[in-house]
Image (cartoon, helix red, strand yellow):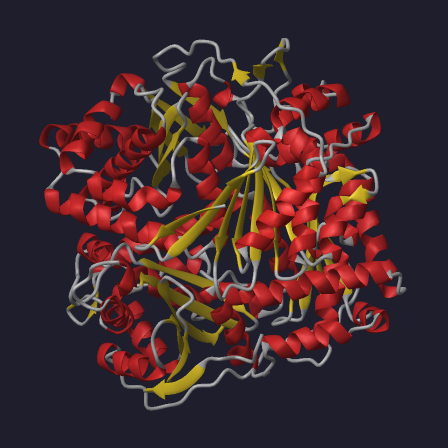
Amino acid sequence: MNKSLFERGSVNNIRIHVLPTKRFKTFAISVYAGIPLQEETVATTGLIPFVLRRGTASYPETTKFREQLEHLYGAGFGFDIYKRGDYQIVQLRMDTINDSFVNSEESLLEQSFSFLGEVLTQPVTENGSFRASYVAAEKETVRKKLESIINDKIRYAAERCLEEMFRNDPYRLHPLGSRAELSGITPEGLYEAYTNWLQEVNLDLYVVGDTSLDEVIRLVEKSFKIERPQAKQYTGTNVNFNTGDVRTVEESLNVNQGKLNLGLRTSITYGSDEYASALVYNGILGSYPHSKLFINVREKESLAYYASSRYDGHKGMATIQSGIEIANYEKALEIIKNQLEAMRQGEISDLELSQTKAMIRNHVVEMQDSAFEMIAYDFNRVISGKERSADELLEQVEQITSKEVTEAAQTFHLDTVYFLKGEKGE
Amino acid sequence: MEKFQYEKLQETLYHEVMDNGLQVYVLPKPGFQKTYATFTTKYGSIDNHFRVEGEEEISVPDGIAHFLEHKMFEEPEGDIFATFASQGASANAFTSFDQTAYLFSSTENISANLETLINFVQNPYFTDQNVDKEKGIIGQEIGMYADNPDWRVYFGLIEALYKVHPVHIDIAGTVESIGTITKETLYTCYNAFYHPSNMLLFVVGGVEPEEVFNLVRANQARKDYKPQGKIERLFDAEPAGVNERRRTSRLPVSLPKCLFGFKETKLGITGVERIKLDLTTKLALDLLFGSSTDLYQKLYDQDLISDGFGHEYNSDPNYAFSAIGGDTRDPEELLRVITEEVNALIQTGFKRENFERARKKKIGGYLRMMNSPENIAHEFTRYNFRGGDLFEVLPIYESITLEDVNQRLKEHINWEQMAVSLVVSPE
């Protein structure tokens, strides 16, 4: 395992990161576009990629646009919109077969760049704006997505817990915004927002595959028709780790199983020197089948099928989630709180420590087998401003003592308890 | 040790059958950090009625294959997850209609992890107490799926299509059915289906094939397996037609979920022919319902479908069905437009250029799948259990003609064989 092998360059204030390798059968391409998460812009920014995927100057009709992807041997094309710290990230992805496996006349990498460049910088327009029918249809699609969150109760409970926990912070916002904001968007307003966004947004373009930095720079210059005179930088996230009393929120829906979600705050972030301690803390608490939550909630008490924790170093927080019998709420909550307290008291065995380190090591090392995971890890560096190669992280994790884990545990404070229960009472 | 070279794919596969009948395959992936291994028995939720040669015929409770999978992780010395964790491996398992797979992925201690995987699966340890404890956990797993509308609409379709065949029984069973499971029934199923001759070990990643075979040979030589007779899986006759035309479940949803499918009539085919039939059917479905088709765009423009409208084809020599659908504001109108447009396509057949493009897309998807050790291991095993070879898929794709796909379209899309499953909000 060696330090990051990405080669770096820049075109038009788009940062370029290329990792030349012959290990994969494809070229993995990823564009990260990030701007501060704000109530005023979250819905419009979230809608932009939905409209961009409907058509470009060369492929204005959606069926033709999708047929072109099929011509490229079914190139994978997709996008995600999510929060990372205080930023709203739009990520565009392509995954294209390396030409050596198929009999293609033109370079598939070159054609993929032409396609992706057009998607981002030359959408189909009418009268100097987005095509109105596409905007109307995609508003409808996003509205349905927002409304469908309630269908998956695990996800719904997780979103609701965050909303409650960050009710005074932009982080409460859903990355697609709200239905109310969405409804007011016009094609003209959206097009204007899009042109501003292209100027203001942080742009990072990654490629992993059998290519070179020079080739990628040439392809970006050729395919991304955009002038960006100003350099952009991510400037960090506001972490509020002061918690008052624990807030409990209960909600009733027509469900069989109750969903118990807890939100915790911590001062340790991705940029902190203690980051590795927080990772180990989270591992011992609830990331694995040997973790305290799994053992105590599931294996010892048979209360749940899943009981786990997740740490988010970009926002300085952690969540705990479990699906339980509604009548077992008090009991499950007490057991979970006991685990948090045990960690604060330093009740951490050598075995828990060594097992957790081994699992983290495995995860970090195996990232190298996935092009998109290597890209995602490197992007942490860009968004946080903290240089920490996978090698360095491994070394730091290896050094962590149970005392340091205990100290990390003392920075995690329970903030919100959210419980989704049935309508019929217990 | 046999060696198979697939030049077009730039892959080399190694194979050996152990003396006790265990099939072992190794696919080295030079440059990969991790090793991924699956140890799979050809035993899933549909195998609820069987006879091992020389023994009595037996019927077992619904959900027992999945229950057994959960219980395998417990050993006399404790939970096997802890052993894997100490060796830096991430372990898991899953049960499907026709197989149960145990797996790990790790970047270190590969030999120790392989030994652990093989040993824990070959060492059942069930007690009255640990069987009882699991009922609470699986009860919550069942409750979780009961709240999941996607799962409900999918299983609703299978229940509507199949009357007798156990594919219509939920893989986890019900709280009542698992309530009847005892350690004795678990041992009975274990002894029938976990004999090495019914299992396949697949190892992919940064490994030396000879080392893996040496390890497995020595490991199996230490164990005293008696040859086992043939397993006869007993299935009562399934009527040709569908069980019900329509099935509706009620669960709070933002929009109705509508999934429809066709019950396959062309069954009993195995090996290359089966694979070709599968791939041809999937191509036909993609040409009908894929996101680049005119039909898809028309439905999207009429606000009858949204992202998430999709299709799949699930097949086995004994049962096969398609499943098509997603969220819709109006299930009746959706089905009406689809019926009309699909009937028109059955008359005209697909256009050649669309066929060629769809096939290109499938070939690309297949090659992309080859980047993932997990997918290779799962798909290879699935193909193998059906008498096919994952690495021979490219020539099969090349052999499929437009006429084959048009023929398949007419065969599979038989409205008499169709059922609809809906999930709608309670009134």
Q: Which residue lies furthest to the left in this view?
A: B348
For the point 59% across and 51% down, the residue is B212
Q: Where is residue B204 in the image (x, y as percent from the top left)?
A: 52, 52
Q: In which quarter of the image is residue A316?
A: bottom right
Residue drawn where x is 66% and y is 36% of the image: A257
User: At which x and y percent is residue B29?
Assistant: 48, 59
**Is B169 placed left or right of A399 in the picture?**
left
The answer to which image quadrant residue A213 occupies is bottom left
Residue at (31% x, 19% y) in the render: B265
In the depicted structure, whether residue B89 falls above or below residue A357: above
Residue occupying the point 59% across, 79% down = A389
Q: Nearer the viewer, residue A349 or B107?
A: B107
Q: Determine which quarter of the picture holds residue B304.
A: top left
Q: In this view, does B167 lie above or below A356?
A: above
Asked whether residue A31 is in view, the answer is yes
- Does any portion of residue B299 appear in the rendered image? no
In the displayed structure, A140 sits above or below A391; it is above
Place of residue A339 in the rendered image (x, y in percent of width and height, measured from the top left): 83, 55
Which residue is at the front of the view, B134 or A141? B134
Answer with left or right where residue A157 lies relative to residue A206.
right
